[in-house]
Amino acid sequence: MDNFQKKYQKKVGTAKLNINKAVVGQKINCRLSYTAGFYGVDDSGSIKILFRLVSDFEEFQFTDSAKDNFVKISTSNKDLEIKVESKSSGALGKIYLRPWSRGFTLHLSGAFLKQGDQIFIDFKNWKMQTFCEKKFAFKIFVDPFATGRYLEIEKSPEIEVLPDSAFRLKIVAPSQVKKNSFFKALIKLEDQFGNPCRYSNGVFQLIENSQILGIPQKIKFKNGRVVLKPKIVNEGSFFIRAKFDDTEGISNPIIVSQKPEVNYYWADFHAQSGETVGTNSVEDYFDFARDYAFVDIVSHQANDFQVTKEFWNKINKVTKAINKEGEFIAFPGYEWSGNTPLGGDRNVIYQEENNPIFRSSHALLEDFSDIVTDALTADDLFKKLKTKKVVVFAHVGGRYADLSTHDEKIEKAVEIHSSWGTFEWFFYDALKRGYKIGVVANSDGHKGRPGASYPGTFHFGGFGGLTCVLAPNLTRKNVFLSLYNRHCYATTGARIYLDVNYSLPEKNGIMGDTVRTKEKPVLKINCFGTSAIDRLEIWNKDKKIFTHLPFINDSLIKIVCSGSKVKGRGRGMIWEGEVRLEDNFFEGEIGRVNFFNSNNYATVDSNVLKWKGETTGGVQALIFDLKNNQGMLKMKLNNKDINFQISDIKQTPKVFNMGGLDAKVEIYRVSKDKKPAGISFEYELNKLISGSNPVFVKVIQQDGHMAWSSPIYFEKK
């Protein structure tokens, strides 16, 4: 707090709100009342009503009281004229400093406010954000002297944003366990937006499986969750199933073996809390990751330019306290948030506490006493980190990392997916530069849900990703060793089981390895999805070399739009499409995959399907059945005409490039059976080129989720 704020804060007014809680995604009506303080507000002064940057509530409008999200402004001073500046009135950029970047400004003219005068802000049918928050603040900043310099009132009103009613039963289990050994699994209730139903208590009913022991048929739960301790008596693939009222849930696949060669540990290395630009406290953050996301590993990644000395010390204190070897691993860390020309976003993860923070800048800090420690470029950062036990990931967020700067001893992976989108182009860029890197995915979440990050309706329109670390046991040292050796894979958030290894006459190994050979390696792939699998692909660098298609009987047609417009913040690719059928008709419901944004829709009428969507590197899809296999499919997508015989649509995708950075549309057939499926096969790599061959596997599921293995680097002699 600067001296200006300290001196005048108590005399710039007060505010109150006539509600104290709201439910996620619901429409609310409330009144915010501001009362001017000792200084009043001078003619041509202004007041800002502000909300957090990451909140995905619907944008305000001030012109039509019959429509949703209407805000009415009134005042006790009838001589005062108030004009509103907002996004809906054409305002560009941020309304105020981050994280308080959303909201609107009230410009006063024609008179002034004296002490005791009031302004009333009435919100009508305002659709609340989709994630829970303990202290959702209505921040009020006042320019009492009409200088353009704002003061925050001493206490801004707050409400609690609560979860909606139960919508989904989620079961989270380890991906691999030892036969006849007890393990932990989580059953929880979530609302339609993925928030845990923390205030729900009741009884889950197990759907019996005679090979899963140690679970009673009826299981009491509290605060929306319960932890089980079952064991499985046979080898193979298994699922835990349970129900609550009419809602059923199924776990991720559990692979059981007599003696697993490695263990599978799930991680979210990249998100942040409300002390910077996220939601809720840092303590809440780690508690959620452990108790509700049920991940094994987590790190905290606040934007460095907003991390005070005190907060950096607190992050280290919290990770040290909550870390428990063998059970739950918490790493201290931060996001180096340099502008792209200086190196772009990097995740810095320390193995232990009490290491320094080398910031990219002090952009939002008042204390400049340690500014000499800043690392102004990614190259500076790598130099300062050389003597530390640290691992760095390059990633794409608002900014994207410039991969022309790289240190192979420190920077061990690139982030291929987060809630910002999917960035295969970024992965390919690293491989084409000849870097030996692994692949990770994380949430980059700002909604207080590390490890279980769901899409909203505004920022962050995709599921948060997860990284699976392959390690002998769950310790900080072993997790770091696995990351250094690239023994990990990435998913778009689903706990897909993926085992990619290789065999040679002289040795065997796993994903991430580097191996020199004259022979023809055999890839051995074992995958079990969380839904039906469309296909598995084998890639060498940025080229697909093989596609494995599962056998299907009855099929549906799937149209997939994917990709982005540009690399940076404006990456959203808008899709507007229409499919017309000739001599055929749509049958049944249209399956919608990743239609999250409130402006997205898909409608069908007999033989016409229309939709509007958006992708930020990831996928959006429509799945449908037809009356027969005859006639023509005529599609107009973003003013491009695509026509073909329906009988020509096969499992192998028809691919049409759509411009942008990597935008394309694919049409192919998928299975009517949506149940989780397993695929195992071997593939001989008989066409390796001289030099480095980074070979990896990509998994594409019917529900839109994907996975990528870290490459095996075959060095052909």
Image: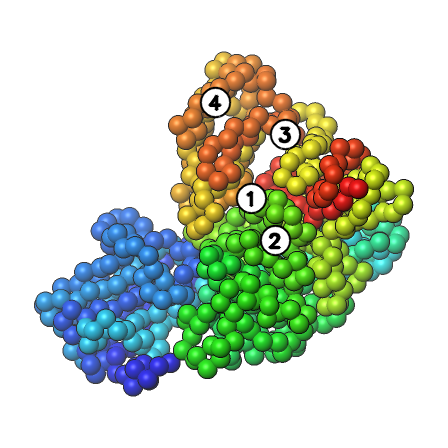
- Amino acid type at circle 4 is Ile
- Which of the two labelled residues, at mark 1 and mark 3, occupies the earlier sequence position? 1
The residue shown at (61%, 47%) is 433
Label 4 to label 2, Cα distance in Å? 35 Å
Depth check: 426 or 471 in front?
426
Q: CA–CA distance between discs 1 and 2?
A: 11 Å
Residue 678 visible at all: no
Label ID, residue 425: 1
Give the mark, 3 or 4, whose residue is nearer the N terminus: 4
From the viewer's perspective, is 479 left or right of 107? right
Residue 426: where, in percent of width, then height?
A: 56, 47
Nearer the camera: disc 3 or disc 4: 4
Callout 2 environment at 10 Å: few (<14), some (14 to 19), or many (20+)? Answer: many
User: Type of residue at label 2?
Assistant: Val
Nearer to us: label 4 or label 2: 2
Instruction: Tell me the number on the disc at residue 642.
Output: 4
For the residues labelled 1 and 3, say whether their Cβ atoms are less than 8 Å apart: no
Left or right of residue 574, residue 669 in this image:
right
Q: Earlier in the sequence, mark 1 or mark 4?
A: 1
The residue under label 3 is 670
Q: Nearer the viewer, residue 398 or 169?
A: 398
- Amino acid type at mark 3: Val
- Disc 2 marks which residue? 414
Instruction: Confirm or deny contact between disc 4 and disc 2 (CB under 8 A).
Output: no
> Which residue lies at the image location 13% right of the left edge and 64% below the top edge?
81
